[in-house]
Image (tube, rainbow, N blue to C red):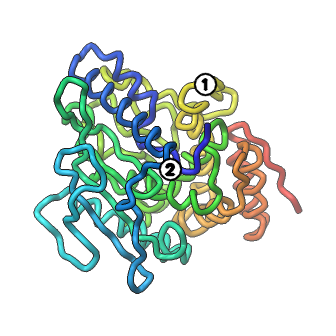
């Protein structure tokens, strides 16, 4: 069943399921704990038992307002408030990263799209760091994930073997907070191709937050998602590669090989991962990168604007071809060259989108 705000995690189920088959007992235990925790959170939301304390207040002046909590290595949200808007850095790097990256995401949407927070009306950005999960053996284990639960962000510290603390990555924070933006705009249903588009737009704006913050042009960016949250290894470069889906990790002892397709001819049509929402997002991801590199310059200036305006117009149940058509129509307002570039990008991944004169 699709929900308005399913628990949306940066580490997809196909990675966690792979970890469940690991020959390392500790890795298996952590994967089991993370799967159980996600199921419990979804069940709690379905029963309407979300804690009132998670309701984010509005900023007094209607502008940027951030609250960061510390779970203190427990599994309860939101935890203890440790940093608020207007306060300086603290000794804990995870707190400062969560605070700063949420601020960068707010600033990006405000500066580029004139959007006031996730809901467009000054919603407070709430995050919790140092979240852990019980492993069923009387222990708490690090959360190997970060997620948006419909009201707030939550970050694990990682296991130090495969994952590092999840606050390290600006594009991960931007990705997850963009799920919040989508819940107030297109509200794409989280299954099948509409769910893959939900993940796609989160990837697009997550990476654009980073490129905007760092001044990276489209032809010089690496287009990786979540590279900072992985412990370095020759077999892993990131959680996803938007430009070259299927290559973010290859032959890794723990992660296996990235299953994302880059073309409709390899579309995943099974039932896992809500019908492949994290798997098939590789197809539109590549289309965006191709359009951005063809149009050149800063990806957020032209291509990002096309995708943002498209996101506002998408129906809840949207197929790839419908999204492509809307992207081309939106690009047409900028001229025939922009429309042709966007159409060609979608065609390159096997999705036809007509260019209207």
Where residue 350 appears, as percent x and y from the top left, is: 72, 37
Residue 236's place in the image compared with 346, above or below, is above
In percent of width and height, residue 252 lies at 34, 23
Taking the image as shown, residue 204 lies to the left or right of residue 57, namely right
Which quadrant of the rendered structure holds the C terminus?
Answer: bottom right
Q: Which residue is mark 2?
A: 203
Residue 140 falls left or right of residue 339: left
Q: Is residue 252 above or below residue 305?
A: above
Instruction: Name, please, the residue furthest toward the bottom.
Output: 61
Tell me residue 269's x, y (percent): 66, 25
Residue at point 18% right, 75% down?
88
Write down the residue under mark 1: 271
Q: Is residue 319 above or below residue 35?
A: below
Q: Residue furthest left?
A: 91
- Secondary structure, mark 2, is helix
Q: Residue at x 17, y 30 (%)?
A: 139
Q: Quadrant of the N terminus?
A: top right
Left or right of 69 on screen, residue 121: right
Q: Secondary structure at mark 1?
A: loop
x%, y% of residue 312?
66, 63
Q: Residues within 10 Å of mark 2 (few under 14, many from 20)?
A: many
Instruction: Give the residue displayed 29% in from the left and 60% down from the top.
Output: 98
Instruction: Tell me which numbered mark, 2 or 1, is placed earlier along the sequence.
Output: 2
Snapshot quadrant of residue 339: bottom right
Q: Residue furthest right?
A: 357
Q: Quadrant of residue 186?
A: bottom right
Residue drawn 17% across the image and 70% down it? 89
């Amino acid at each position: 069943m699709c929900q308005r705000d399913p628990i949306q995690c940066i580490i997809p189920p196909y990675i966690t399921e792979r970890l469940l088959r690991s020959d390392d007992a500790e890795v298996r235990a952590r994967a089991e704990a993370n799967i159980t925790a996600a199921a419990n959170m979804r069940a709690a939301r379905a029963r309407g038992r979300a804690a009132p304390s998670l309701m984010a207040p509005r900023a007094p002046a209607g502008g940027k307002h951030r609250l960061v909590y510390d779970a203190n290595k427990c599994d309860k949200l939101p935890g203890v408030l440790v940093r608020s808007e207007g306060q300086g850095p603290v000794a804990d790097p995870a707190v400062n990263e969560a605070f700063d990256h949420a601020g960068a995401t707010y600033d990006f949407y405000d500066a580029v799209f004139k959007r006031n927070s996730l809901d467009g009306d000054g919603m407070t950005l709430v995050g919790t760091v140092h979240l852990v999960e019980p492993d069923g053996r009387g222990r708490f284990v690090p959360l190997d994930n970060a997620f948006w639960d419909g009201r707030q962000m939550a970050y694990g510290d990682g296991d130090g073997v495969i994952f590092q603390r999840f606050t390290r990555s600006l594009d991960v924070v931007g990705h997850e907070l963009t799920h919040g933006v989508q819940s107030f705009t297109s509200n794409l249903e989280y299954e099948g191709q509409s769910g893959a588009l939900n993940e796609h737009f989160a990837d697009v704006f997550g990476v654009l937050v980073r490129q905007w913050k760092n001044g990276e042009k489209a032809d010089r960016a690496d287009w990786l998602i979540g590279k900072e949250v992985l412990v370095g290894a020759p077999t892993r470069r990131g959680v996803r590669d938007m430009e070259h889906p299927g290559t973010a990790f290859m032959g890794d002892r723990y992660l296996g090989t990235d299953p994302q397709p880059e073309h409709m001819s390899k579309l995943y049509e099974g039932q896992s991962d809500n019908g492949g929402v994290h798997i098939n997002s590789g197809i539109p991801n590549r289309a965006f990168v191709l359009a951005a590199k063809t149009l050149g310059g800063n990806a957020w200036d032209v291509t990002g604007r096309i995708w943002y305006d498209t996101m506002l117009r998408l129906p809840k149940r949207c197929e790839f071809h419908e999204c492509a058509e809307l992207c081309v129509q939106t690009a047409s307002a900028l001229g025939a060259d922009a429309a042709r570039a966007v159409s060609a990008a979608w065609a390159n991944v096997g999705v036809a989108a007509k260019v209207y004169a």
